[in-house]
Amino acid sequence: MERLRAELAEFVADVFGSLPRRDQLRWGECYVRGLMLDGRRKSIQPMAERLPDGNMQALQQFVNQPPWDPLPVRQRIAERLSEVITPEVWVIDDVSFPECGTASVGVARQY
């Protein structure tokens, strides 16, 4: 991770360049590092525990209650991806899971 820190900082500055405050940029970088680290679970608590500068509450607020507009960040990520993979189409999937079994209460069949 240390070898890639400069490259990661460049990526974060580009992708999160629309964020209005420096502390938001800092937590954006911390969040991306957490996603890149080894570890099966990529939710906030396990990532914060693995990061030396991880703060669960700050990361949680960065992801779940952002005072910044996520649209420019998503747009910049899409632009960077388009430069690399040159997609012909974009497909948006809901990433939900099908119902397990036949006796789940109050849940209709999804698929």
Image (cartoon, rainbow, N blue to C red):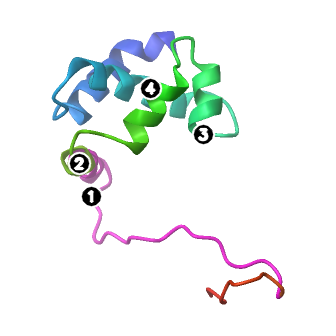
Separation of marks 4 and 1 at Cα, in angstroms: 35 Å
Looking at numbered disc 4 in the image, what kind of residue is underneath it?
Ala
The answer to whether the residues at label 2 and label 1 have Cβ atoms under 8 Å apart is yes
Q: Which of marks 4 and 1 is nearer the N terminus?
A: 4
Sort mark 1 into few (<14), some (14-19) or many (20+) by Cα contacts within 10 Å.
few
Which amino acid type is shown beneath numbered disc 3? Lys
Foreground of the two, 7 or 14: 14
Q: Earlier in the sequence, mark 2 or mark 4?
A: 4
Which numbered disc flags the more N-terminal residue, 1 or 3? 3
On the image, the x and y values in percent for residue 85 come to: 32, 54
Residue that label 2 marks: 83
- Dot 3 lies on which element? loop
- Distance from Cα at disc 2 to Cα at disc 1: 6 Å
Circle 4 — which element? helix
Q: Provide the residue designation for mark 1.
A: 86
Locate residue 27, reporting x and y percent.
38, 24
If you read the primary sequence from the N terminus, does the residue marked by circle 2 or circle 3 appear first?
3
Cα distance, mark 2 to mark 3? 26 Å
Q: Vertical placement of 103 versus 87: above or below? A: below
Residue 110 position by quadrant: bottom right
Which of labels 1 and 3 is toward the front? 3
Q: Give the range drawn in magenta.
A: 76-102
Q: Give the percent coordinates (x, y) of residue 87.
A: 29, 63
CA distance separating discs 1 and 3: 28 Å
Disc 3 designates what residue? 42
Q: Do the residues labelled 3 and 4 touch (CB within 8 Å)?
A: no
